[in-house]
Each structure stands twice: as C-alpha cells, then as structure tokens.
Image: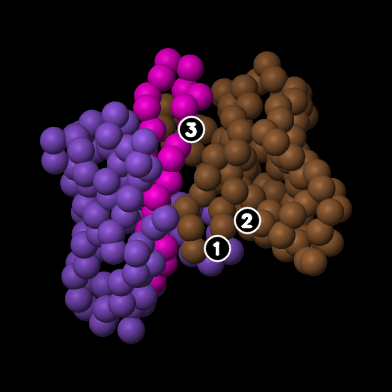
Chain colours: A purple, B brown
Amino acid sequence: DTGVSQDPRHKITKRGQNVTFRCDPISEHNRLYWYRQTLGQGPEFLTYFQNEAQLEKSRLLSDRFSAERPKGSFSTLEIQRTEQGDSAMYLCASSLSSGLGNQPQHFGDGTRLSIL
Amino acid sequence: KNQVEQSPQSLIILEGKNCTLQCNYTVSPFSNLRWYKQDTGRGPVSLTIMTFSENTKSNGRYTATLDADTKQSSLHITASQLSDSASYICVVPSGTYKYIFGTGTRLKVLA
C-alpha cells in the first residue's frame, strides 16, 4: 500500500491559464473522488468515479472543470481558464466499495493551486 | 438538509492534557460516522469509523463515542502530544458515495 499520490504538490499559475492535476489512487481501489478545500473549511465534493465511469459531478462546478479516469486507474482534473476563486487545495481520495459502506477514504496530500 | 456541525471551531490546550471534540449531524439515513485528522498542508487521515451499533471505539489515545439517538459524536484525546496539533474533521456518508464533511476543529497543543 503506497498510498494515494498527487502531482504536482503545488501549482502557481496566472489567471486564464489551464492547469491539470494527476491522482494515482491505491491500486486495488475502484472508487476515486476529487474534492476542493479552502482554508478553514472541510473538503467540498467535486466529482466521483466508480472504476472508469464518472458517476457524479457537483453542480457547483462550472464547465471549466473536467475530470477523467481512463482505464479506471489514475485520474486527472483539468481546470480551464483559471480564475482567482479557483485557488484552493485539490484533494483526491480513493476507497474500496463494500456492501456495508464502511470502507475508509484514503486521501492524497493534495495539490495546492495558487492563481496570480 | 444533511449537515455536519463541529465544535469548538478551535481549541488550545497544554501538552499532556485531555480534550473532547464534538460533532452533531443531521444526515439521514445514517450508516456510519468517521473522524479524520488533517495535519497542515496534508490530506486527511482516517482515525476511526463508527457504525450506528457502536457506542465507543478507541484508536490509541483517541476514543470516539456515538449516540445515534441524539445524532452526536465526540472524539476524546487523552494525554495530548504536540503531534496532535491538527484539524479534526467529522464526516458522515450521505448515500452510496457522497460524504458530508464538517468544517473541522483546529487543535493546537502547546508545550
């Protein structure tokens, strides 16, 4: 178990640029989540994958956000035409699905995005 | 509306002292409640998961309690250490894959 890894850890970019983050979940985990967290707040749900299928996307997300999980392995989150309000920590988590629904989510250490 | 509320928002204690963090939830139907520890600049790490049939669960110096009738949970930290300084987040699943996160309690342990 090497844990969930995210890359890059930090990203600084100018407003209007596109950015892409990568998440490598724990290998046997079929569920993958993306969250956004701002200072002093809990993680906010962005999107969810079951294997390679994106089953849910938050209504809070604009069309500038897109996520993929090809082949049900790693996932990418892209933000187009970044805005100041996109500055946040972007967290990825993975878990196993179970009938009891009591599997823990394993989080990566996130990508901190700063928009200049 | 499904909500998770935590108190206090922040807490400062001296090393070696005990403390208790509170979590109230209104998520229904209820299946389980989770406590996570989040160090600054890191992702949350699971401390414990409690199902509705569990009243108390311990993980080292961390003890979580759950009262499913009053929809309250607490996390008790015994003999605090400097490394306990972190945010502690209460999470309740809502449905198959949605999770309702509290805003966390920021704990600072002073030497």
Quadrant that contains the C terminus of chain A: bottom left
Quadrant that contains the N terminus of chain A: top left
Q: Which residue is mark 3?
A: A104
CB atoms of marks 2 and 1 within 8 Å: yes
Chain letter, disc 3 residue: A
Question: Is B98 located above or below residue B83 in the figure?
Answer: above
**Residue A9 sits in which quadrant?**
bottom left
Mark 3: which amino acid? Pro
Residue at image point 37% right, 27% down: A96
**Residue B4 sits in which quadrant?**
top right
Q: Position of residue B40 (x, y in %)?
A: 55, 63
Q: Residues within 10 Å of mark 1 (few under 14, many from 20)?
A: few
N-term-proximal mark, 2 vs 1:
1
Magenta-tinted stretch: A86-108
Mark 1: which amino acid? Thr
Question: Is A16 located above or below residue A41 in the figure?
Answer: below
Q: Are marks 1 and 3 on the same chain?
A: no
Q: Position of residue B94 (x, y in %)?
A: 50, 32
Instruction: Measure how far apart labels 1 and 3 are at the Cα level.
Output: 20 Å
Chain letter, disc 1 residue: B
Q: Position of residue B9 (x, y in %)?
A: 72, 59
Using the image, tell me which numbered label, if any, was put on residue B40.
1
